[in-house]
Image (cartoon, rainbow, N blue to C red):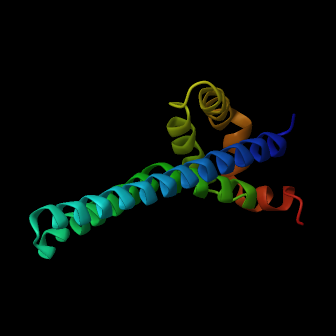
Amino acid sequence: MTVIEHSRILAIGFGVFAAIFTFTILLLMVVSLGVFAALGITFANETGNSQQAGIGIIGGVVAVIFYGLLAAIFVLPMALASWKMLKGRRNARRWGIAAAILVATIFPLGTMLGVYGLWFFFSAEARRFYLNESKAIQALPSH
């Protein structure tokens, strides 16, 4: 396989994992918001004080911030790695290494993709490919 084919396979793999993580985080965020809204409504009804619903609002805001941080930690590196690898950018190798380490924690498919990514990014061919950005961009087929 050529460097371009390895790069394309990894970019697609990182993109798929980024999409799965995005969907999962959004789903968990919606469920958490629903739980906190129900908690606030229930607490306000039990106490008879409508101001007690603020606990649900505060919990919902904390949940959104928490899931936003999770997305920034897990989704952003994989999405950027995928996009930069498909575009043949010079710093795609750095983002790819970060994404490979993150995805390697997900057993078994993520582990295989992560090990494959680390093997590829630390190879001499990948170093040469990503250090010469103009050559990398010319080598990628345009659609």
Q: Quadrant of residue 100?
A: top right
Residue 91 visible? The answer is no
Residue 37 is situated, as x and y percent measured from the top left of the image, at 31, 64
Residue 40 is situated, as x and y percent measured from the top left of the image, at 23, 64
Q: Residue at x 51, y 36 (%)?
A: 101
Q: As drawn, is 6 to the left or to the right of 78? A: right
Residue 65 visible? The answer is yes
Q: Residue at x 67, y 59 (%)?
A: 83
Residue 36 is situated, as x and y percent measured from the top left of the image, at 29, 59
Q: As drawn, is 47 to the left or to the right of 105? A: left
For the C terminus, which image quadrant? bottom right
Q: Residue at x 71, y 42 (%)?
A: 10
In depth, the one of 46 and 38 nearer the eye is: 46
Q: Quadrant of residue 1?
A: top right
In depth, the one of 135 and 117 nearer the eye is: 117
Would you place residue 116 above or below residue 137 in this image? above
Residue 108 is situated, as x and y percent measured from the top left of the image, at 61, 24
Q: Residue at x 55, y 55 (%)?
A: 22
Would you place residue 104 above or below residue 41 in this image? above
In depth, the one of 72 and 90 nearer the eye is: 72
